[in-house]
Image: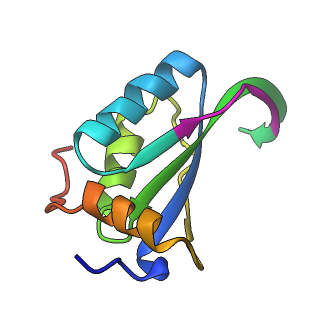
C-alpha cells in the first residue's frame, strides 16, 4: 500500500473536561476507525471568553491523528459525543512525516466513513 500524501493526514486538536471523557470519546473514534491514535495529555488551564464572560477551567487536551477522508465523520462524532456545547475541533494538515508512520495512519483509517446519524 502506498503511503498517503502528508497533506492527506490531519492532526486534530480538541479539549475535554476530564481524562475519563477524553478516553471514552478517544476510544470511540479508534473503534470506528476514524482515528489512528489519540494522545490524551495532562490537564491544563484554559482561559477563554464564553457568553460574554471570561472563564477559567481545567481541561484535558487531545491530539488526534486521522486522514482527510475520515475527518468529516470524525468531526461529527466528536461534536455529537462531546459534552461541550461548542467543542474545539481544529484540523491541521500534516506537512511531512516518516513514511512508515504515514502508512500506519492511513491503514488505521482506511475504511468508508459515512456521516453518522444525528
Q: Residue at x 32, y 40 (%)?
A: 30
- Which corner quadrant holds the C terminus? top left
Q: Is residue 48 left or right of residue 38?
A: right
Location of residue 9 with respect to 111 vertically, above or below: below
Q: Is residue 41 magenta?
A: yes
- Which corner quadrant holds the N terminus? bottom left
Q: Is residue 59 left or right of residue 93?
A: right
Please provide percent x and percent y for residue 37: 43, 45
Q: Is residue 102 magenta?
A: no
Q: Residue at x 48, y 78 (%)?
A: 6
Q: Residue furthest front?
A: 100
Residue 26: quarter of image: top left
Residue 71 appearing in the image: no
Location of residue 21 with respect to 118 vertically, above or below: above
Q: Residue at x 53, y 52 (%)?
A: 89
Residue 82 appearing in the image: yes
Give the magenta part as a residue range: 39-47
Q: Say which of 34 and 80 sits in front.
A: 34
Residue 52: quarter of image: top right
Please provide percent x and percent y for residue 112: 14, 62
Amino acid at each position: 500500500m502506498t503511503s498517503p500524501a502528508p497533506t492527506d493526514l490531519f492532526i486534530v486538536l480538541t479539549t475535554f473536561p476530564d481524562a475519563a471523557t477524553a478516553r471514552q470519546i478517544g476510544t470511540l473514534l479508534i473503534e470506528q476507525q476514524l482515528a489512528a491514535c489519540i494522545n490524551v495529555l495532562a490537564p491544563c488551564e484554559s482561559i477563554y471568553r464564553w457568553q460574554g464572560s471570561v472563564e477559567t477551567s481545567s481541561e484535558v487536551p487531545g491530539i488526534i491523528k486521522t486522514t482527510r477522508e475520515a475527518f468529516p465523520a470524525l468531526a461529527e462524532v466528536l461534536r455529537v459525543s462531546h459534552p461541550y456545547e461548542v467543542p474545539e475541533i481544529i484540523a491541521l494538515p500534516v506537512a511531512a512525516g516518516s513514511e512508515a508512520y504515514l502508512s500506519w495512519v492511513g491503514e488505521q483509517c482506511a475504511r468508508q466513513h459515512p456521516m453518522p446519524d444525528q
